[in-house]
Image (cartoon, coloured by chain):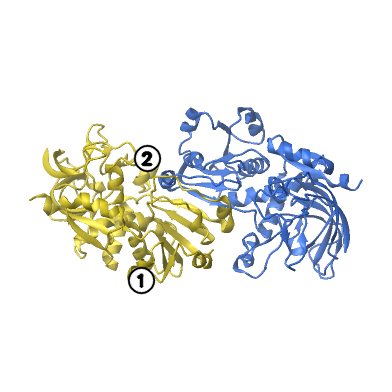
Chain colours: A blue, B yellow
Amino acid sequence: MIPVKAYAAYNEKDPLAPFEFKRRALGENDVQIEIAYCGVCHSDLHQARNEWGGSMYPMVPGHEIVGKVIAVGAKVTNFKVGDTAGVGVMVDSCRVCKNCQRDLEQYCVEGMTGTYNAMERDGKTVAQGGYSTQIVTDEKYVLHVSDKLDLKAVAPLLCAGITTYSPLRYAGVTKGMKVGVVGLGGLGHMGVKFAVSFGAEVTVLSTSPSKEADAKKLGATNFLVTTDAEAMKKYNGYFDVILDAISANHDYTKYLDLLDIDGKLLVVGLPSEDPKVSPFSLITNRRSITGSMIGGIKETQEMLDYCAEKNIVADVEMINMQDINNAYERMLKGDVKYRFVIDIASLKK
Amino acid sequence: MIPVKAYAAYNEKDPLAPFEFKRRALGENDVQIEIAYCGVCHSDLHQARNEWGGSMYPMVPGHEIVGKVIAVGAKVTNFKVGDTAGVGVMVDSCRVCKNCQRDLEQYCVEGMTGTYNAMERDGKTVAQGGYSTQIVTDEKYVLHVSDKLDLKAVAPLLCAGITTYSPLRYAGVTKGMKVGVVGLGGLGHMGVKFAVSFGAEVTVLSTSPSKEADAKKLGATNFLVTTDAEAMKKYNGYFDVILDAISANHDYTKYLDLLDIDGKLLVVGLPSEDPKVSPFSLITNRRSITGSMIGGIKETQEMLDYCAEKNIVADVEMINMQDINNAYERMLKGDVKYRFVIDIASLKK
């Protein structure tokens, strides 16, 4: 067993606090990673506070993990000591169902094993995440990370990156398409970067006029203030695709109305209340709403390789592990550009 | 001008009553049709009673129209006197926008012209529907009807038929696919017939166990009682496609949960309250909700030709024009198998 330092939520109310626990001993297919950085995802907060129900405590959140391989099991073929590696939102799945076989492990028929707040497939070990000094993961669920990129800014690619890359690819976003992005946070800002890199004309939709300069800096061509009824009217039926990365409560109709023929609203944000949708807006222009959950391991690797090639990383603000509770509060206010990343070195002090 | 007898809603409260008005004189591109039968669509009732807002009175409902061509304008090339013909949900559109150019006139950028409760494109004539003895329509919006089929049972194909045919085709329903149909009424029963004819394994979902025998008679393989939580659980993640033809208020999540990877909930029912949808259900299995509104003229003709080839018609119950108000009440109770069709001969007495 491998002792590690961590930060954990001990229950749904109290702030996260130091925690020590043991990782499993290195199995023959396992990779042992010394974690350098871990991104802070809104779902960390949702789960730490049991906002989705079913949380298991103590919980070590974190599923945007990057670091160095420090040991590999006897049968590991794809990683060696010294490699830069990452672990994302899942660490296992059944591996045999039709979805696993099609590299869609995130939709495993038996349910994927989350990186934390989940039971491992041995039925007794609780998976713990990246707010910790090390992680031990089967190599099939470990990603290669290029050394060309700034490692701390790579961490958010493991969740925010793949969560936006996958649906934009699935929707066939390509040169000249009109893409809207709603919710300019950790997910949304990656959505803008990817859609721009695919050649789309990107519009950021926001309630805050103050975000326009930032949107343009990220590569957006247009900026649309969603509280401006006149401006919204002009964009009625305009977009081919809108990426909805809003985690606050909202309804879908307002954005659906902006879609052109066969337009797609891609849902990746997870508000706690179920949004409403107008069937009249759906049948107009044959519009769709499509959900998407992270991406498979193969596609996540493809995304990381694409980012290395195109020099795409997240915009991050570094914090120490000890700042996590304050970071959660700031995240709730949208006060971060655009992703907090924990310097795990701070945990070792 | 052409005098016609009709039944109209004079306001949102009173029963429909006799009405006489004049159709436009035959234009050079027009076809004049002596109406034989007109189907009764739930949207006739919604609009007669102003349940969707914006109704124009007096209103002659009816957009499932079949009859005989009795005159054609000088430039008409596609129809001749004596032809059996139909008129569906639209009688005009802008004809030049990108959607009209792609045979998707129902999604005309300027808005299609509905067969009734709509302003014609001259900006002054109110379009009036098929609860009348004759109709005059531009030949581009008139359909050919095969004499091989029972004409009175063809009428509902013009709305209920194309409304279900088009989304099932768009979703690529084919041999071996698992298709669910919710809402076994005028639309739903056509959805079952089409999905069966495309080779799908069809399941009817209903709150009423009493509908099982009828569902099987229509060709369904399975029947699922949606109030039976255990049975519903077994179908979790089962379907490739579910056609939602419910016009009563409901939420989408219950049906979404039944969809397999990349499954599609096809929305053609139009409840008056906006349904809710769980984003968690959407992101599981990368599910979609897609709306669909009737079909273009080209596809409507394709559907009618397909029905003639496969011998598909609606199951109808004939009524006289004078029975329309009672028929509306029975339709509200779901007491019809599956479509009322008005024998327009009764209007001439």
Q: Residue at x 74, y 40 (%)?
A: A328
Q: Residue at x 22, y 47 (%)?
A: B139
Task: Say if residue B30 shows up in the picture.
Answer: no
Position of residue B338 measured from the top left corner of the image (x, y, whole percent): 28, 60
Label 1 or label 2, whichever lies nearer to me, is 1
Q: Amino acid at mark 2?
A: Cys
- The label on residue A41 is none
Say whether disc 1 or disc 2 marks the residue closer to the N-terminus: 2
- The label on residue B97 is 2
The chain containing the residue under callout 1 comes to B
Q: Are marks 1 and 2 in contact (CB under 8 Å)?
A: no
Where A229 sits versus B327, above or below? above
Q: Quadrant of the N terminus of chain A?
A: bottom right
Where A329 sits versus A84, above or below? above
Q: Amino acid at mark 1?
A: Lys
Q: Residue at x 76, y 39 (%)?
A: A327
Residue marked by disc 1: B216
Neighbourhood count class around disc 1 (C-alpha, 10 Å): few under 14, some 14–19, many 20 upward: some
- Work out which residue is located at the far left of the displayed protein and give it: B349
Give the distance between the C-alpha atoms of the residues marked 1 and 2, in whole angstroms. 43 Å
Count the numbered circles shown: 2
Please identify the quarter of the rendering in which residue B303 is found.
bottom left
* Depth check, front residue: B165 or B284: B284
Where B27 sits versus B170, above or below? above
